[in-house]
Image (cartoon, helix red, strand yellow):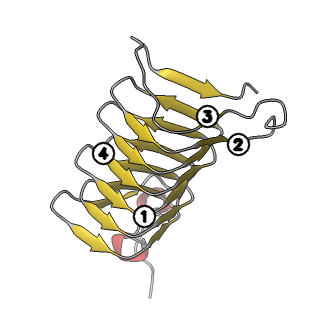
Amino acid sequence: MNKPYRMFNQKSKSETNDAPAPGSGAASIIAAGTTLKGDITSNGDIRIDGTLQGNIHCTAKVVIGAKGHVQGDVSGQQADIMGRVTGTIKVKELLQLKGGSQVDGNLHASKLQIEPTANFNGQCHMTGASNSQSNGQSNGAIEKKADKPLQYGLSA
């Protein structure tokens, strides 16, 4: 039997995998109105718009939406916080606390950006290759009276 001719040697739909490859830009989303109890581990981006009672372990970007609430620790490559987090946040690169966010817990990041209307209560630990030169640590709440976001980080 002869195989059917395929233009440009394309695979048929039955021969392709519909699931996106890890790290291909696909994100996991916990939608608003959803409550999840337990830990989440992800190799791709993750966005929380609902409530999570547990920890997030992510090797990519973590986004906590404006209505999102995490009661647990968050770790990832990068993070944007617009909602509420009660727990420790550990980020290898840039951590952004957006306007209206509420964080009660310690922060660990190599770069930190806090917008003026963000609320942070805890300790901040700056990590990175040049940590021996600059150990930016702050205790307690940070009061901001600036027109521009605060940007902390180690220059490369």
Residue 57 percent location from the top left of the image? 52, 64
**Residue toward you, 1 or 93:** 93
Kindly identify the residue that appears in the image at 49 percent across and 62 percent down.
9
Q: Which residue is mark 4?
A: 83
Task: Point out the tag, 3 or 1, that comes first from the N-terminus.
Answer: 1
**Residue toward you, 66 or 142:** 142
**Residue 72, disc:** 1
Name the amino acid, label 3.
Lys
**Residue 127, disc:** 2
Looking at the rendering, which quadrant does residue 112 occupy? Answer: top right
**Quadrant into which the C terminus falls:** top right
State the CA–CA distance, disc 1 to disc 4. 13 Å
Task: Point out the tag, 2 or 4, that comes first from the N-terminus.
Answer: 4
Q: Give the crowd class for mark 1: few <14, some 14-19, many >=20 residues within 10 Å.
A: some
Kindly identify the residue that appears in the image at 32 percent across and 65 percent down.
52
Task: Point out the tag, 2 or 3, that comes first from the N-terminus.
Answer: 3
Q: Which residue is mark 3?
A: 111
State the CA–CA distance, disc 3 to disc 4. 19 Å
Residue 145 percent location from the top left of the image? 40, 15
Task: Point out the tag, 3 or 4, that comes first from the N-terminus.
Answer: 4
Name the amino acid, label 1.
Gly
Residue 106 percent location from the top left of the image? 53, 49
- Pointers 2 and 3 in contact (CB under 8 A)? no
State the CA–CA distance, disc 2 to disc 1. 21 Å
Q: For this view, does 156 lie left or right of residue 120?
A: right
